[in-house]
Amino acid sequence: MNAQLLNQMVQQVRGCTRQGKLAAYIPELAKADPEAVGICVMDIAGHCWSAGDADTVFTIQSISKVVTLLFALEHCGIQQVLSRIGAEQTADAFNSIIKLETRNSGKPLNPFINAGAIALIALLMETCGDNLFERLHAYLAKLTDNHALTIDQAVLASEQHTGDINRALAYYQKGMHVFDADVDQVLDVYFRMCSLQVTVKDLAALAHLLAVNGCRQAGAARLFSPESARCVKVLMTTCGLYDASGWFALEVGIPAKSGVGGGILAVVPGRFGVGVVGPALDEKGNSIAGIALLKELSSAFRWSVFA
Amino acid sequence: MNAQLLNQMVQQVRGCTRQGKLAAYIPELAKADPEAVGICVMDIAGHCWSAGDADTVFTIQSISKVVTLLFALEHCGIQQVLSRIGAEQTADAFNSIIKLETRNSGKPLNPFINAGAIALIALLMETCGDNLFERLHAYLAKLTDNHALTIDQAVLASEQHTGDINRALAYYQKGMHVFDADVDQVLDVYFRMCSLQVTVKDLAALAHLLAVNGCRQAGAARLFSPESARCVKVLMTTCGLYDASGWFALEVGIPAKSGVGGGILAVVPGRFGVGVVGPALDEKGNSIAGIALLKELSSAFRWSVFA
Amino acid sequence: MNAQLLNQMVQQVRGCTRQGKLAAYIPELAKADPEAVGICVMDIAGHCWSAGDADTVFTIQSISKVVTLLFALEHCGIQQVLSRIGAEQTADAFNSIIKLETRNSGKPLNPFINAGAIALIALLMETCGDNLFERLHAYLAKLTDNHALTIDQAVLASEQHTGDINRALAYYQKGMHVFDADVDQVLDVYFRMCSLQVTVKDLAALAHLLAVNGCRQAGAARLFSPESARCVKVLMTTCGLYDASGWFALEVGIPAKSGVGGGILAVVPGRFGVGVVGPALDEKGNSIAGIALLKELSSAFRWSVFA
Amino acid sequence: MNAQLLNQMVQQVRGCTRQGKLAAYIPELAKADPEAVGICVMDIAGHCWSAGDADTVFTIQSISKVVTLLFALEHCGIQQVLSRIGAEQTADAFNSIIKLETRNSGKPLNPFINAGAIALIALLMETCGDNLFERLHAYLAKLTDNHALTIDQAVLASEQHTGDINRALAYYQKGMHVFDADVDQVLDVYFRMCSLQVTVKDLAALAHLLAVNGCRQAGAARLFSPESARCVKVLMTTCGLYDASGWFALEVGIPAKSGVGGGILAVVPGRFGVGVVGPALDEKGNSIAGIALLKELSSAFRWSVFA
């Protein structure tokens, strides 16, 4: 990797931020800087390169769904996870409720749409006992090697205030017997997870761990099994960017997960962990500059796993 | 009308109850007698004829949506009511959520599906102040001339316990800004209204009032305007039996509203008010014997408003 | 009825034509005069009152579905008709294909959406033998008492050229085994029926026949049974104006059927037959001035069957 | 690879064929042997291992969509291809029409559902001139190195006879202006491509070419560019097994494409080309034994690209 090249690429994509829009459905997110663009790349040995607004703090939003999935895979195993959620991409919006009714089971399509993440938190609440948020928070601290991650209280209040579609997704699933846990408690964890503040460095550290299958370096503690890593990378590849996942696989070709805070977590298996940020979103809710940046890098360094 | 004929007809349709099923989604409803069939017909002068299990007590369920609509029309007027709900039949199930997403407004299709009745209660909560259930309850007492109507507490507990799909319908609408009222309070009124216990005599009294446009007899208090009566009868005709409303208009041809407790409220404008009960339901959630009975009567006495 | 009042009403509603748009999906229809408004009212005795552009010639379009339905009811009976189509309103657009897939039967919701009219023509093709268009055409001549009705060849060519969504509706139903007839032959009849040219006087004559249940006057030939008349009026009430049928029942309250040529056929049972025209359509495909005119008349003369 | 192991694995999975069913919607396909299971694996150097019913002849069906896509990518480029079709997985059935209406563009979700393959053939018909089937047939001959591939005329007749849902998909897209080509001509090519007879050896040869990015060996003619190979492998990974694609990525993890004839084309990039057959299908239309066999192999030889 090359810091100068990263800087050039950040400058190059900054212009496209104007074609995007800040997330509007959570009012607090609309206060972000729409022109911010930042990146951090960590290589296999743990060396980091940053460029642009790499210190910008933003809320993790849907990227937290990767953490929830990893935790669920570690604690419940892939079979129990798949008893609650599917592994198929949706061609609907990330917060769509339609398929919960049209698929008779009520089972959400995958763990990275809102309905699916809610179902997984409910599974964990039923199987892992108390203090779920604290445990997920602590797990994220280990995954990012950053024990100072805090909640953006203003975003959390905004999430809770405007979270009625998520409440509908939760109650609909409970009504369909997808889970039994208490909806308020489940959503409390869900909203808090979304409101955690990170930087692209935190994302790069998490992505690096996925790139090396769970163990940061020889002798370090294993934070998840290679099997869990594999499952997460598959699902990031097929479902990580909502209903643009297939297009992203074609254009960039690496496992990734986006959030409406503007972050993208991206993994180049066996090579790099990457975090990018750019709060201006495209119409599907993905960072417009973040995707542009990953596309440039994938093309320049042949990152696609399909090449 | 003719009591002997009514008795014959009840006997005739009793057999078809075996082709139906008791409502299962509210467990408490599954305790009803599946073979019960009863009817009460009140003519324009207030004379009553009953047959079969006319004293069977059952919960009013969705027939309460007629009471809510009448109350809303009287207090808010048709224009404000139509600002919150549509007037179109659904071709989906009574508790479907799909159209709330696919129609961009989030506005429910009509006041007689669950989503629509919830939206109307929310409108009333926002505009009519406190004690809404008590006011609706008192209004129903006047409409039926029965001040001893009580809640079936076991059914109410069952509704609340299994009401998660209704909670989803409410939160989805709130998330789409169809209403602002508190969801728990709205659903508390909704569930209590559904759990009120009635007999076919109560239904006949209410239907009679609709048949005479709101004033039981010369000199009596007017309980709703002819305009409200007209609106309710239109909506009962086009949307009263869920996604079997059009077929019922063809087969029977009178304004009616069914409930999963097995009751049907039916109005022969200017002639009769009718209440029927038969807890065994067809696959669309309508009383199988109740429809059969109304079909016989409509045919025998030329009740169809389309004849 | 009163010619002067009709003239006043026509003047009054002419302004609202500017809020509508000519049908665009059949290019030839976009050549109509968007400000034209005309009406003809025929009373029970056969007396006529006309106002506005009562001589404007326009294509019958979906109003021909009433003729097809009447013919099918007379030749096959209501039970066979209902074996092919439903009697429920759609909350989707008139040319929607979704419900053919989501309702497992593939059976169209009602005879007045495109899918349903196609299914009925197929039924007739299978059961009534050759020369179906000629027979339907001759039947319409009798129903309107006008033997000079001809096809607008330019509209027919436009229908055939742009009719691919209708072809899809037909093939989808054939694929679901709703019918067996040859799709090209079925659509040829469908397109020709839609392209027949009429005036509001023709529509008033047809509506008059429905108002008097099939026999124009004592001693005249019966053109359909009272039972067929009843079925058609029920379906016009519940499904006649596409996904605005319920709202129209509330606002106007009489059986009616609209077409994208701008015509509306309206029946005041036992009292009047009405034809109106106004090619500027609202967003649901109904004549904007036509509805306004019927609303005025219904209010002034208490036409609603639900009053 | 190891012939003995392959034989064992074939024996092992043969039992599960009884849980599947032969394709029923094309009657001719129901004549296949439901218990047949065969495989051919070709390594990078072109060496082959076969086991089970490797000489069973079956129709290529949807696997031909890979050939169409390759041809379209080579002749039109990825940008023009993406102007006609999407790259997103569907959560609906392979022949679903719903999304063509609900996504306003009418553009099919991906090239491997029926609607998408039809759209691509239409694109080729518009851009590549005459004799399209002959050219695609000749291209397949080169891709498989088998110039004796012929059409199963009985299957072709069956496809054409029962192809009305495909006709609906084609006309709906034409009506939405996704393409302009003649529907009958487009479907003629589509049905003929589906009816070509292959063995697992042919599939292995085609898969091998994808595994080596288009050039069978040093000095041989290049049959497609590495870029086309990459695009096809991405789309096979995300959309190759209909609405089970995500689950297959999790369980097996390699680019693959199934057909209702029971075949699966599978690519282990840089390592193997694989063809399997097993006409008994699971409920999503994929070979039940074929998937089981690929799962065993992927697990035994670590084939997943996500490992």
Image (tube, coloured by chain):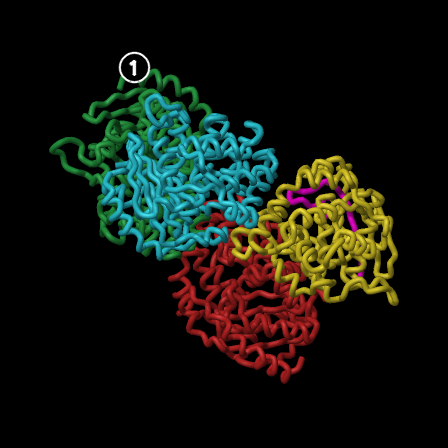
Chain colours: A yellow, B cyan, C green, D red
As helix, strand or loop, the secondary structure at mark 1 comes to helix
Q: Position of residue A27 (x, y in %)?
A: 70, 36
Q: Position of residue A258 (x, y in %)?
A: 71, 49
Amino acid carrying mark 1 in the image? Gln
D29 w.r.t. C26: above or below: below
Q: Which residues are magenta?
A: A270-292
| Residue C135 appears left or right of C24 | left
Place residue A280 in its image quadrant.
top right
Look at the image and tell me in which quarter the C terminus of chain D lies: bottom right
The extreme bottom residue here reads D4
A123 w.r.t. C120: above or below: below
Disc 1 chain ID: C
Place residue C28 in its image quadrant.
top left
Q: Position of residue A32 (x, y in %)?
A: 76, 37
Q: Is residue B150 visible?
A: yes
The extreme left residue here reads C219
Give me the residue at 54% from left, 61% from top. Answer: D65
B1 w.r.t. A120: above or below: above
> Which residue is the site of mark 1?
C4
| Residue A293 appears left or right of C105 | right
Q: Residue A2: within the magenta?
A: no
Give me the residue at 48% from left, 62% from top. Answer: D133
